[in-house]
Structure formats: C-alpha cells, structure tokens
C-alpha cells in the first residue's frame, strides 16, 4: 500500500526566469512529480480591445504591434488585411510582395527567439545568444526599412509606411546566405545534442486529436503531425504564388507530437521561410506602396473575420464596423492564448524540470495571451 | 549589516576615499533582477545578448531578488503585477536601484489614457532612479540609462545627507 | 545492450561536436558594439525622439489628432490682422501663434503616425535616443518658442482685439436691425 | 610546507596558521581569477566580450563584485531558521577549504602529508552536502528545499563512480597518498597514469584506453559533485530560480560562490593528481638542467596550477556548451552508465595490473 502523502503547492512566477514573461503557474507537486498545473494569466492585460474602440482604424495598428511583440509585423499584417477586406480595396502588387517578405523575416525572427528561449530553459545559454545575434541581423533589416527595431507599425491600411530601402534586396540576400549555415550549426550544437534530445523527446506529448480538440494551431499543431497551415489552407495575400512545404512532426527521436517535434518544426519552418523569401525577393514589381484610399478611413457597416498564420498559429481578427471612424469592436483570436490551454494537459505526470521544457516548446507570448 | 546603514557626520579624507571605492564597486557591478515584463523585456534581452552585451558593464541577470542590485522595469506594469513588483523590490537587499525602461513603465505609455488595467507609471509604486524613454528603447538607450545610473551612484556618499 | 552502448557513444560524440563549435567561437571575433566608445551610425529612417521645427509649425493640430496616445499638446492663439508671422519654409503663411507645443516623450509610442499628416513637414523623428532622465517631468519637451509672458501677451492682445471687434460690431448692430444676434452667439461660443 | 614552517618557527600553532593562511590566500586569489575567467570565457564563446569597463578587459570585475557584496544588506527572512541559515555557508566553505589541506601543490608545497590523502579528500568533500541541505532547509523556501534535496541525492550518488575510479588508481599505484601518487608519475608526460604509468611494459600500453575511460568517468562524476552544468540541477537557474541559495544574499551568498569555485579547483586537482602527473612537469625541469635545485618546487607549483586551471577551463567550456540534464536522467547517468562502466574498468585495470 502506498504511503499517503500531502502534495506541495509550488508557485512559479510571475517573476520566474523561464515563464516567458509574467505567466504564473501554480504547480501541485508530489515530490517533483506534477499532479496538477494551473496557469494564472492576466498579469499583462493591456486592454487592447478597449483601446481599439477608442482609436481610429490606423491608430489601432501600433496597439496590434504590442500584442505579440515578437511578431509585430505579422500582427500588423493580419489587421490591415482585415480592414482592407472591410473597405473592399486592393493593394498594389509591390505592397503584397514586400508584406510577404517582411512577414516571413518576422517569422524567422520570432522562431529564433522561440528556439533560443526553449534552449535557454533547458540550460543551453550559448545557442540562445547565437540566435539573438542572428536575430539582430533581421532587426537591422527592419530598422533600415521602417526605422524601428521591435514595434514597427510598418503595414498600413492600403499600403506600407515606407518603401523598402534601395539596399534591402541585396542585404536580404546576404542574410539568407549567412543564415543557412547557422541553422546547421544550431542543429549540431543543440538540436541533435543527446542531452537536449533526452530533455525534450517523449516529453509533453500532444496527441493529434487532443490538439484538434483544444484548437491548438501553428507549430504546436504541426508538431503533432497535421499539415495545417493557413498560408496554404486559406490563402491570403499572395502566398499561393510561392512554392513551400509545410513541415510536420515525424517523431524522429521520440513520439510524434513531443516537445522536440514542436521545436524541430520551427527549425524546418525557418528554412521554408527562407525559401519563400528567396522566391519573392527577385520578383518584387515596381510601383507605388500606397493604394489610393481616402485620407480618413471610414469603412462601411459590416463585420469581417480574417485569419493569418502568425508564427505562433492562427491569428484571427474579427472587426465590427458601425460606419464610424473608430471600429466598433476588434476581437482577436490570439494563438498563444489558445495554445496555452492545452498546457495543463501536457504537464501531468511529468517532473518540474519538464514544465519549462514544455512551456518553451509551446512558445507563448504573454502580451498576446493577456492582450 | 550593510555598511551603508551607518552614516558619518564628518566628511574626512578617509571617508571620501572609502566612498570612492564603495561607489566604484557598486556602479561597476550592478546586477539586475532577471525579470521581463513585456515588449521592453525583449530589448532588454537583446541588450544582454552578444551585440550590446550588458556584461561589459558588469551587469548580469540574477534570478532571485536576494542577489540583485537593480530592477529594470521593462514593460507595462498592470495593476495585478504592481503588487508583485513592490514585493520584489522589498526583497532586494539595500542598496538597490531601479531603472524604468520604456514608456509604459515611465507613465503608462500608450496605455495611459484608456488602459483601465495599467499602472500609470511605476513610480507610483516604487522609487525610480532613472527613466529611459523609448517604446521600446534601443539597447543603446538602455545602456545610456545605465551610464546615467552609474553617474548617480558615483555621487552618493556615506556622509550624512545634511552635511 | 546495443542500444546502451549506442546511447553512451551518441552522448559523448554530440558533446564533443558541441564543444568543437563553442571552441571555434572562442576565437572568432566578437560582434559586440562597445557602446559608449563606439556608436554605430543609425539608418536614416530611424525613429527615435520626436522633434518639432517650431519655426515651420502653423499650429494646425493635425499631428495631435493623428497621435494614438495623445501625447502632443498644442495651444494656439489667432494672430491679429496687422501682425506678420512670416511663412514656413515651404511657403505656407502662418496665421496662428503657437503658444504651447508640448510633447510628452514619456508617453510617446514612436509610431510615426504624427509625421505624415503634417502639411509643413515640421514634425519628424530624429536619431537622438540618449535622453534618459532622473526626473520624469524633464521628459515633457516644450517646443513653443514663445516665452510665457509673450504667450500671455499674445492671448491678451487677441482678446483685446476680439473685444474691440465685438464692441465695434455691437455699435454697428445697434445701428442696424436685430437679426445679427445668432452670429454673435456663435462667435462667443468660439471664444470659449 | 608545514614541516618547513615548523622547523622555522618551532611552534605547531604558528606553522598551522601560516599554512592555512597561504592556502586561504591561494583560494581567494584563485576565485577572484576564476570568476573573471569564467565570465570572459563564456563571453568569448558567445561572440561577446564580457566585462570590459573596469581595468584592462575587466580584470577588476570580481573585486568590484566582492566589495559591492560587502555593502549589501544582510537579509534573513523571518521564517528562516536563523542558526542553520547562518552556519550553512560557513560549513560549505569549511568543507571545500579542508579539502585543500591534502592537495600537494608541489613536492615542498603541501598542507599536510596525509598518508590516506585521497581517502581524506573524498570524505571531506562530501561534507559540503550537509551544508547544502542545511541551507536548503533553513531558508524555508520551496525552491531552496527542492534544490537541496536534489543536490544531496546527486553528490552522494556521484561519490560512487568517483571512488571506483580512484580505487583503480590506488590498485595500480598501491598507495593512498596523493603526494606519493604524484611522485610516482615522474617528470615527462609519458609517465603519467593516463599513459599507463611510469613502468615500461606491455601492461602500460594495454592500460592506456582503460585509463582514458577512467579519466572520463571521474571527470564527469566530479563535474556532478561540484554542481556544474550539465549537472547543475541543484541551482538550475531556469527551473529552481537559484536552487538552495535562493534566499541568500550578500556575503553569505559570496561564501557559497567561493566554495563552489574552490571546489572546482579541488576536483580538477584530483583529476590532475590521479591521471596527469600531479605537480610533475611534462617536459622535465628547468631547475634540474641548470642546476638550480631550489627552482624545482616553484616549477612544480606552476605546472600543478596550470593543469588545474586547464581542467577548470574545460569545466567552463562544458558549462557554456551543454544544456542541463533532468534530475532523474542525472541519476540514470550515474547508476546505469557511470557505475557499470567504472566497475568494469576497475576489474579490467585490476587484471592488467596483475600481468
């Protein structure tokens, strides 16, 4: 007969080095074994929806930046195509190409942080800094184009805030050439390291049906083996013109859908993003970067829902317009928030050390969870 | 037991020299509390990363407040978080410093008007030494904020403030 | 057993590969920018502190309305007919005294939405980023070039002028018939 | 050295105090250097620069840290067990300090000539466990407690492979004295134990691979004993905040750090003595060839410290390369991998030495 023992409640966060911001986890422990996990959110609730009600359509864009601050470009992207759909306007070809390139660069930058922090949680400090070093190169591309390093406010309704810099194409190509070998180096240093594999393989296995039931999207869903990508499923912008694959988790070193698969899908996705950029960068047509739209954006009455493939999953914008200068309501379907829900399920029966490995592999951004 | 608790009324040469040494030590090893809040935290991480390298200034992140000397409030402080930050601040042993990084921490930033759940400036909860503006500030701006803080520490003294 | 030996080997081998990589990096030059000593030039479009060239400002309030965070505060006083405020560099005639043009940089979110609406391109983002302060109040930047006394003077001048105009109009109104009153109330509203 | 001082002063007390003082000064200097060195090594591995602003390439950084730590407020949480909390860092440092007593820095420079040196070293270094447990328990912090429990389990387990490898060396050399083990591996590197020892025979060549395995095992397990990555789970920054010293601040915390770095050198010294000739020079002595006999002990000290620092460097190198193991995997590595290999190694070395 097992000895009946009390469980211990361990409070992890909001100030904890590896809760990716200010998530608070209430762990119920039996020794080091997890009985139950309760995530507490709301430490970074910044009232996005309230702000969207008080702002005009272009003024909301800086606030979308600040939701998922690791993928600001993509948040802008989703929002502007929603408003453009509401307005019923077509943006110039050049704008579409630049948006796609920027979006994919942002995806790489975001995945770099995700991979880096996942490694950091497991104790590998050096790869994290290597990845940040590479991310700095992407940021300098962004900074050259729009002047900001993190929160860009680059994609505007009906166009872009700036045209690309004359050097942009050359530097982007240089970056692609530089970046390919560093992925290999990262794989050697971290991905296929025995200790890293031991720490992540077979940990936090997310079966496909559970993933679908919880509505998990993005790399976490693809890690479980389903090739679902909104860029292909529900094509937006000009993604249908590019040839790229959707990497899925195959369980190379463990079970399909474990932490390692989610991690590895991100690495493969970065390579696919590089492919898209390579195809797009040579085709950028000449032209204007602003569509002819009225100075004061005043969409007709109506509702719109658009979804894009954010680096973290399906990012949806639901906008209700009542015909005024301000949107009546902007509701965001944030991928991190939805992905976080499955977290408690994944942690059960693992050790304390696995919690952070799992959390890192889900890759949440608290700004987006709490909004 | 901190030596700074004792104050001396007369400012002689010895005290001045000791002052210099102590200030030098404190300003060249400001260990920050490894603690990120929001967007600015990413820039703070970028500052610690290879390109800007916080370690050059002797700044290393310590995860427990007990071993830290400074907090960099990097991001939006919500009302729910403010109490936690106050507690963290109280857990840091003296002498301690606070850098308020970015618009949100300075005064609520973009959320100052409609943000019903955002603290309008971290200085309403804890005393701030240096305000670094920016949204988010460039890593260089944060480094400059640190240099300002060092300047402030350099002018501190063991002597009574009234002398 | 085979798996066991393989695990051992794989463990040692990957560790060695990792060590090789880090050792290589030990001798590659660092990418660090030694900030206070070395400052890299920023790209030309960089978005940092806002600057207002007040000589060019016509006080149109466009930037303030475009700002999502309302960090720009502008107060203007109409000029008198006799006064010449000069023109802006792109030839626009100024008609308003800008008595107050405050930007609370602490609130600013550096989104650059205020820049495109400006008709005279007098508000723009500079590459100055080193402006941290010990006091938050120092982060409110006052761009208006009128001193406080001057601002008060302009205001009173305008009020005096308005009052004179009012008086003369009243004299005129007394002379003519009554239907002018609604116009007058409108003007009063505006003054408020 | 003790003998020398005893002869000089004629007083046991003075000799003891002076010997202890010399070792203490060495530890302090080493730690000042090692912390700075670690920061520089890690920085350059990560394409950074590390401390740069105080002194040449930041050499004074550790001194600044230390003086700053002196000034920090000393907080003891109300709920903490005050007595244990205060004793714990002292105890931990005592453990690692005591270990230095038996380490021969050179043929003349050693604290005391203990006949059972290696035995003493292993015994005293596990003294640290008690201190760590005390620290974890008395802090009254769940993270500290978890860290302390992990640490105790870890250090106790990894004693076993260490002891097994030590046993194989003892079998080979037939002595427990560190001084004698060092002496046996006379100058020139082919006489080192890692190359099969000084005796030139068939056994020497047969021994080389097994000595190498032994070296790997003892290096890995001592790494775990001093809680360095990949075995730093008691501190595990990203899981347990700072492990057993989460609640410690100022000088008390500095004591822990001091003992951690002192331990790093101590275990490197063990590895050096057992496998890499201890204080023996790899290329013969300059003092002997130019006829200045008095130079030899200093040369020996130089070589010993250089070898020690090299192994400390490898520890740092590993730390900044590898992720960290999980607590159960740590135990797996010890019980399922290291101990069987060490045991097998022991038997084979035993057979070969019979030849």
Image (spheres, rainbow, N blue to C red):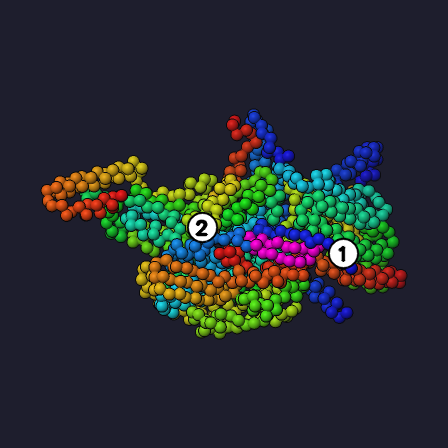
- The answer to whether residue A47 is visible is yes
- Residue B1 percent coordinates (x, y): 64, 34
Horizontal side of D103 relative to B49 (left or right) equals right
Dot 2 alpha-carbon crowd within 10 angstroms: few under 14, some 14 to 19, many 20 or more? some
Query: Which dot, 1 or 2, sits closer to the camera?
Result: 1
- Residue A26 percent coordinates (x, y): 61, 54
| Residue beneath disc 2 | B115
| Residue beneath disc 1 | A3
User: Magenta region, mostly helix, strand or loop?
Assistant: strand
- Residue at coordinates 89% horizontally, 61% vertically from top-left? D354
Asked if the magenta segment contains residue A20, the reply would be: yes
Asked if the magenta segment contains residue A170, the reply would be: no
Relative depth, front residue between A124 and B76: B76
Relative depth, front residue between D145 and A114: D145
Dot 1 alpha-carbon crowd within 10 angstroms: few under 14, some 14 to 19, many 20 or more? few
- Residue A270 percent coordinates (x, y): 53, 66
How many numbered circles are shown?
2
Asked if badges 1 and 2 are on one and the same chain, I answer: no
Horizontal side of A188 relative to C37 (left or right) equals right
* Magenta region, residue range: A19-40
Q: Residue furthest top?
A: B10
């Amino acid at each position: 007969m097992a000895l009946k023992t009390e469980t211990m409640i361990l409070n992890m966060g909001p100030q904890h080095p590896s809760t990716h911001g200010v998530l608070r986890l209430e762990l119920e422990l039996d020794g080091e074994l997890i009985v139950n996990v309760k995530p507490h959110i709301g430490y970074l609730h910044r009232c996005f929806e309230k702000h969207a009600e008080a702002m005009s359509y272009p003024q909301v864009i800086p606030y979308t930046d600040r939701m998922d601050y690791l993928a600001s470009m993509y948040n802008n992207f989703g929002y502007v195509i929603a408003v453009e759909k509401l307005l019923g306007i077509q943006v110039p070809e050049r704008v579409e190409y630049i948006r796609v390139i920027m979006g994919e660069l942002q995806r790489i930058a975001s995945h770099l942080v995700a991979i880096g922090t996942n490694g950091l949680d497991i104790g590998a400090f050096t790869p994290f800094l290597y990845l940040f070093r590479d991310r700095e190169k992407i940021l300098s591309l962004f900074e050259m184009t729009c002047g900001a390093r993190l929160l860009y406010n680059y994609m505007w309704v009906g166009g872009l805030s700036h045209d690309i810099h004359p050097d942009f194409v050359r530097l982007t190509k240089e970056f692609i050439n530089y970046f390919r070998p560093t992925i290999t180096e990262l794989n050697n240093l971290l991905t296929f390291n025995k200790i890293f594999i031991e720490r992540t393989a077979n940990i936090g296995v997310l079966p496909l049906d559970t993933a679908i039931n919880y509505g998990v999207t993005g790399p976490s869903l693809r890690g479980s083996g389903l090739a679902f990508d909104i860029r292909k499923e529900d094509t937006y912008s000009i993604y249908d013109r590019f040839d790229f694959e959707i990497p899925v988790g195959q369980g190379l070193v463990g079970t399909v859908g474990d932490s390692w698969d989610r991690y590895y899908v991100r690495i493969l996705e970065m390579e696919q993003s590089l492919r898209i950029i390579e195809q797009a960068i040579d085709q950028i047509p000449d032209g204007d970067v602003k569509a002819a739209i009225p100075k004061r954006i005043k969409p007709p009455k109506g509702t719109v829902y658009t979804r894009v493939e954010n680096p973290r999953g399906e990012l949806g914008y639901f906008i209700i317009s009542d015909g005024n200068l301000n949107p009546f309501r902007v509701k965001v379907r944030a991928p991190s928030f939805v992905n976080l829900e499955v977290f408690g399920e994944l942690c059960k029966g693992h050790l304390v050390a696995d919690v952070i490995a799992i959390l890192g592999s889900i890759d949440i951004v608290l700004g987006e969870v709490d909004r | 037991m901190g030596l700074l608790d004792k104050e001396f009324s007369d400012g002689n040469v010895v005290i001045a020299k000791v002052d210099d040494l102590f200030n030098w030590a404190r300003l060249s090893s400001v260990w920050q509390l490894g603690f990120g809040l929001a967007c600015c935290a990413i820039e703070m991480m970028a500052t610690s990363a290879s390109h800007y390298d916080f370690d050059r200034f002797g700044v290393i992140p310590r995860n427990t407040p007990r071993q830290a000397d400074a907090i960099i409030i990097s991001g939006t402080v919500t009302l729910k978080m403010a109490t936690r930050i106050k507690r963290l601040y109280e857990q840091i042993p003296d002498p301690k410093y606070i850098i308020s990084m970015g618009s949100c921490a300075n005064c609520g930033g973009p959320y100052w008007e409609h943000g019903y759940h955002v603290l309008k400036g971290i200085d309403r909860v804890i005393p701030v030494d240096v305000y670094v503006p920016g949204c988010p500030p460039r890593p260089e701006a944060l480094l400059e904020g640190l240099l300002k803080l060092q300047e402030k520490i350099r002018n501190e003294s063991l002597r009574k403030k009234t002398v | 057993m085979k798996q066991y030996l393989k695990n051992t080997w794989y463990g040692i081998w990957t560790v060695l590969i990792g060590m090789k990589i880090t050792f290589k990096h030990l001798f590659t030059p660092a990418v660090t920018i030694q900030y206070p000593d070395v400052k890299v030039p920023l790209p030309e479009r960089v978005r940092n502190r806002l600057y207002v060239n007040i000589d060019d400002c016509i006080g149109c309030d466009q930037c303030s309305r475009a700002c999502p965070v309302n960090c720009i505060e502008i107060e203007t006083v109409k000029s008198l007919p006799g006064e010449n405020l000069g023109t802006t560099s792109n030839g626009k005639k100024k008609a308003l005294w800008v008595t107050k043009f405050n930007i609370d940089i602490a609130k600013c979110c550096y989104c650059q939405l205020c820049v495109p609406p400006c008709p005279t391109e007098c508000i723009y983002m500079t590459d100055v980023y080193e402006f941290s302060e010990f006091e938050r109040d120092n982060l409110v930047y006052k761009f208006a070039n009128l001193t406080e006394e001057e601002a008060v003077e302009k205001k009173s001048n305008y009020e005096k002028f308005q009052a004179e105009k009012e008086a003369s109009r009243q004299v005129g109104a007394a002379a003519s018939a009554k239907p002018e009153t609604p116009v007058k109330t409108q003007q009063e509203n505006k003054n408020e | 050295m003790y003998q020398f001082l005893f002869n000089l002063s004629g007083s046991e007390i003075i000799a003891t105090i002076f010997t202890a003082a010399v070792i203490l000064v060495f530890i302090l200097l080493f730690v000042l250097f090692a912390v700075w060195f670690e920061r520089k090594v890690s920085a350059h591995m990560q394409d950074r620069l590390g401390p740069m602003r105080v002194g040449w390439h930041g050499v004074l950084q550790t001194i600044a840290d230390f003086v700053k730590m002196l000034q920090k407020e000393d907080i003891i949480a109300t709920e903490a067990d005050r007595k244990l909390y205060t004793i714990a860092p002292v105890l931990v440092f005592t453990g690692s300090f005591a270990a230095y007593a038996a380490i021969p820095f050179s043929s003349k420079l050693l604290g005391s000539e203990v006949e059972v040196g290696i035995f003493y070293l292993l015994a005293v270094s596990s003294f640290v466990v008690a201190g760590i447990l005390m620290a974890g328990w008395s802090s009254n912090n769940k993270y500290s407690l978890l860290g302390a429990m992990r640490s105790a389990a870890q250090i106790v387990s990894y004693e076993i492979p260490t002891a097994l490898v030590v046993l194989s060396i003892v079998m080979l050399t037939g002595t427990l004295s560190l001084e004698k083990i060092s002496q046996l591996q006379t100058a020139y590197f082919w006489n080192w134990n890692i190359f099969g020892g000084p005796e030139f025979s068939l056994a020497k060549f047969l021994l080389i691979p097994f000595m190498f395995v032994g070296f790997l095992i003892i290096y890995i397990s001592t790494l775990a004993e001093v809680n360095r990555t990949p075995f730093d789970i008691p501190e595990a920054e990203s899981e347990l905040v700072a492990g057993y010293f989460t609640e410690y601040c100022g000088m008390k915390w500095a004591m822990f750090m001091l003992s951690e770095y002192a331990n790093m050198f101590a275990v490197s010294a063990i590895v050096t003595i057992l496998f890499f000739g201890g204080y023996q020079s790899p290329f013969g002595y300059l003092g002997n060839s130019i006829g200045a006999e008095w130079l030899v002990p200093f040369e020996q000290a130089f070589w010993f410290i250089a070898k020690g620092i090299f192994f400390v460097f490898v520890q740092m190198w590993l730390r900044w390369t590898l992720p960290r193991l999980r607590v159960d995997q740590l135990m797996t590595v010890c019980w399922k991998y290291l101990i069987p290999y060490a045991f097998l190694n022991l038997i084979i070395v035993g057979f070969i030495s019979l030849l």
